Amino acid sequence: MNKIIFLLMMVVGGVVLAQTNLPATKVKAPAKPKAPTEINSDAADFHMNIHQAIYRGHVVVVDPQVRMTCTWMLVDLPTGGDHLNHVLAVTNVVVDFVDQKGQTNHVTAAQAVYDYKVVGAMTNETVTFSGNPIVEMPTMTIYSEPLVWDRAANKYHFTEPRMISKDTGTNGPAQKLF
């Protein structure tokens, strides 16, 4: 009987000892809810039958990733989901966003069209700028008509770009790249 008690104590002691030597299990913090997108303007009309909102005058959109201003904006409101799928911004469009490197990009254009759709497992999220679009990055300024910002892939697509490097203090004066 003593042998059985001794063996049980060894097994229980071994389990307790093994548990105290286990690496700490990391507990995931609950995901922070995404901050809401805020839209301000001088006036707005909501057409509930066709699921559209039209914002007029000094339109300002503030999102956790992007800040945009324009004069007029049409938004197709989502019917079944919580993600916008189409936005048209017109007149004096200005977009500022911070890229993955923490650098600010500044885009100006006469018009911007945002489109979002999921096809299968592929997410397509683009903003197409037209009307003399210009993107100012920390190291260069790029002119292109149109200019497409692929948000899903985090890249730009340029058509007949004209790129001018900026003097960053290390490579001398700005140069025309193309």
Image: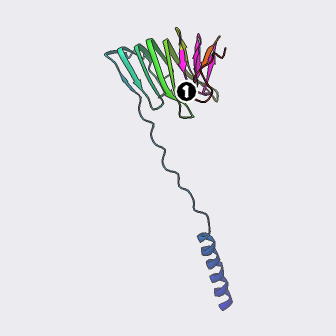
Q: Which residues are magenta?
A: 134-159
Q: Which residue is mark 1?
A: 138
Q: Judge from the rendering whether residue 123 lies leftward or rightward of residue 111; answer left or right.
A: right
Please identify the residue farthest to the front as the structure is shown: 172
Could one spot residue 37 in this view of the protein?
yes
Which quadrant is home to the N terminus?
Answer: bottom right
Residue visible at 57% across and 62% down?
24
Q: Is residue 21 above or below residue 9?
A: above
Residue type for callout 1: Pro
Q: Is residue 154 above or below residue 51?
A: below
Between residue 141 and residue 117, name the one nearer to us.
Answer: 141
Between residue 9 and residue 132, name the one nearer to us.
Answer: 132
Q: Judge from the rendering whether residue 159 lies leftward or rightward of residue 44; answer left or right.
A: right
Between residue 81 and residue 88, name the one nearer to us.
Answer: 88
Residue 37 place in picture, x, y as percent: 41, 29
Q: Quadrant of residue 92?
A: top left
Instruction: Identify the secondary structure beneath mark 1.
Output: loop
Please identify the residue farthest to the top as the structure is shown: 131
Please check the rendered image and state whether residue 147 is part of the magenta-colored stretch, yes or no.
yes
Residue visible at 62% across and 16% down?
163
Residue 119 place in picture, x, y as percent: 62, 24
Q: Is residue 118 above or below residue 3?
A: above
Residue 153 place in picture, x, y as percent: 62, 27
Residue visible at 67% across and 84% down?
7
Could one spot residue 1 in this view of the protein?
no
Which quadrant is home to the C terminus?
Answer: top right
Q: Quadrant of residue 35?
A: top left
